[in-house]
Amino acid sequence: MGEVLVLVDAADGSVKKVTTELLTLAQSLGEPSAVWIGPGYTDAAGATLGEFGAQKVYVADSADYINHPVAPKAEVLSKLVADQSPIAVLIGSSPEGKEVAARLAVRTNSGIITDAIGIAPDLTATQSIFGGATVVQSKVSAGTPIITVRPNSTAPVANAGAATRVDVSVELSAAAKSATITNRAAAVKGGRPELTEAAIVVSGGRGVGAAEGFGVIEDLADSLGAAVGASRAATDAGYYPHAFQVGQTGKTVSPQLYIANGISGAIQHRAGMQTSKLIVAVNKDAEAPMFELADFGVVGDLFTVVPQLTEEIKKRKG
Amino acid sequence: MKIAVCVKQVPDSWAEKKLRDGDSLLDRDSVEAVLNELDEYAIEEALQITEAQGGGEVVIVTMGPERAGEAVRKALSMGADSGIHLVDASLAGSDAAGTSYALAKLLEGRGFDLIMFGSESTDARMSVVPSMVAERLGLPQLTFANKVEVSGGTVTIDRVGDYGIETISAATPAVLGMIERSNEPRYPSFKGIMAAKKKPVETVSAADAGIDAGAVGTSGSWSQVNSFAARPPKAAGVVVQDEGAGGVAIAEFLDAQKVL
Ligand SMILES: Cc1cc2nc3c(=O)[nH]c(=O)nc-3n(C[C@H](O)[C@H](O)[C@H](O)COP(=O)(O)OP(=O)(O)OC[C@H]3O[C@@H](n4cnc5c(N)ncnc54)[C@H](O)[C@@H]3O)c2cc1C
Ligand SMILES: Nc1ncnc2c1ncn2[C@@H]1O[C@H](COP(=O)(O)O)[C@@H](O)[C@H]1O
């Protein structure tokens, strides 16, 4: 069976859910191998990768690979592509993931598909484009298929793999080292799930009216164990930090449930949440375009509807 | 400082977009075309950089059909100095690999200190062309920049990364990609619009740029659309008026959907 390389996405040493999803997808295509790039690899991380089917874990743990943006990861992967001839490379569809994929595609003369939501055993990728209006089947026709996959596209399925560690070291080109990261300010991590990974996202828009108003949004999110999101109007107004913006120029989310509160449903917002499985909208304007997308909508004031919903959820969850 | 800003003409964000039945390419003729709004932030930043330095040159670069010239004019009316328009029938249907190859060929050897990009084209939504051009030209990549500082031959940015803000520095020449939070693009003034009509736009063919016809266009693409379909229509949702129990109604819906 052909080898499928999966680039590991990890923060603070722990493997992200999207990586377990990618390994699960890789199981259906061939033999999954994980690729860890950067310092901080631990046996615990290896165990997680093995749990989801990684037969091998390539570890390139020099700090050099993360002191320069994007290019080093592409160079490590391209060395592995040359040495191992995998049948495909899967990378999470984050902004950086797509950039790594882009450089890798050029280096290996390979076609690239971004934002796949599924991959068939023959490596045909499914994409949802034009804000979810059209579903496309596409295929890479040159080189090694390089496919970036959206978080939450597959449910992670455990399937023990050997996770044999294979150390890798690559001499970086001068070009890869030509930009240097001189400082990192980690995003403040709250107690909530990460936006792109969360099974449920509760968002607030301009209708929330003020930063204090986000209290009702956070309360609802916490009652559901959800992440909090925001529209650009809300982040621009300073109601909520920019890092939580959902939409074309914010995060793309695809949760099981998306609850939009006081968000009109502009096309740029929809671009980031339209593939959510279930959509609920609360808005006092019955004409708000978000209702066209909603599986369930309530026309009303979010400051009465949302707290009532939070109470009701707490009651039902006991 | 000589700055290139790569811009793309795209269908209006609000227009309903469709793929063509014959070749699975975006049907661009049926929709209004505009300058990719995310590229306006790169144009604005380029103008601010040259203004701050009291001089320099901002060149708008596009690859696209004849009418993509309108997007170049729009950028010139904002204040850019000149344009380069790569137009050739052989380029139609190029994917990201082909587009980045063609742009790299077009840009190389022209002495640009900075090659600037938007964060994504609103139609393709790939965010890959800037990295691909950087890779092809062997240039440092400073993308998803929220803040830019140019001093001497060094560019420093704040990159909005996947897990926080990274400060990144590189020497020019470099590829610089802007995000939409970085600035407020100016509106073209009447004077700017009039002046733009007289600014030079160089039209370049694929052969002029030394582009290998086999590496671009539909046939040169490394990825293909096999089929497409409109998303199966979603059953219309239920919308109720809140009459005091709206929150409870949502909880009931979520319960019925087994989300709780
Ligand atoms: C280049 C570009 C990129 C963009 N990228 C993004 C992006 O990534 N993400 C994004 O979200 N937007 C983005 N936008 C902005 C987008 O066009 C909209 O302006 C934005 O999404 C609107 O946010 P909103 O729905 O919160 O605000 P509005 O459109 O003002 O809607 C507020 C809604 O709240 C309702 N409301 C008010 N009070 C209450 C109440 N008490 N109870 C219930 N409902 C109430 C109103 O009826 C209204 O429908 C982008 C725009 C541009 C030009
Ligand atoms: N045909 C093109 N001509 C010039 N620049 C382009 C073209 N296509 C993409 N770009 C640039 O690359 C950026 C990212 O595009 P994309 O990778 O398609 O999302 C855009 O914001 C533009 O700056």
Image (cartoon, rainbow, N blue to C red):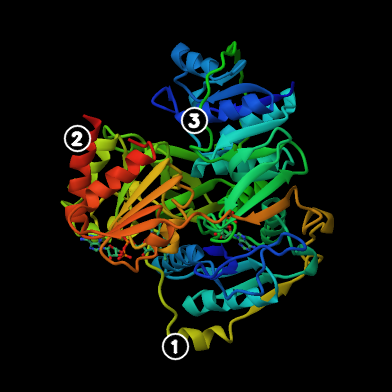
SS at badge 1: helix
**In the image, is residue A133 above or below residue B83?**
above
Which is nearer the eye, B46 or A140?
A140
Which is nearer the eye, A79 or A202?
A202
Q: How crowded is mark 3: few (under 14 residues within 10 Å), some or many (20 or more)?
A: many
Answer left or right for B129 relative to A107. left
Q: Residues within 10 Å of mark 1 (few under 14, many from 20)?
A: few
| Nearest-to-viewer mark from 3 and 2 | 2
Q: In which quarter of the image is ligand 1?
A: bottom left
| Nearest-to-viewer mark from 2 and 1 | 2
Task: Give the quarter of the image for residue A228.
Answer: top left
**In the image, is residue B142 above or below residue A118?**
below
Instruction: Identify the residue position indicated by label 2 in the image.
Output: A315
Instruction: Identify the residue position indicated by label 1 in the image.
Output: B190
Q: What residue type is labelled 2?
A: Lys
**In the image, is residue B41 above or below residue B143?**
below
The residue at the point 57 percent across, 35 percent down is A91
The residue at the point 51 percent across, 89 percent down is B194
Instruction: Identify the residue position indicated by label 3 in the image.
Output: A9
Q: Which amino acid does label 1 sit on?
A: Phe
Q: Decide: marks 3, 2 in contact (CB < 8 A)? A: no
Indicate the chain on which mark 3 is placed.
Answer: A
Rendering coords of residue B28 (x, y %): 65, 70
| Nearest-to-viewer mark from 3 and 1 | 3
Label for residue B250? none
Rendering coords of residue A98 (x, y %): 56, 43
Which is nearer the eye, A213 or B183?
A213
SS at badge 3: loop
Task: Give the quarter of the image for residue B188.
Answer: bottom left
Rounded to the nearest angstrom, the CA distance separating label 2 from label 1 is 61 Å
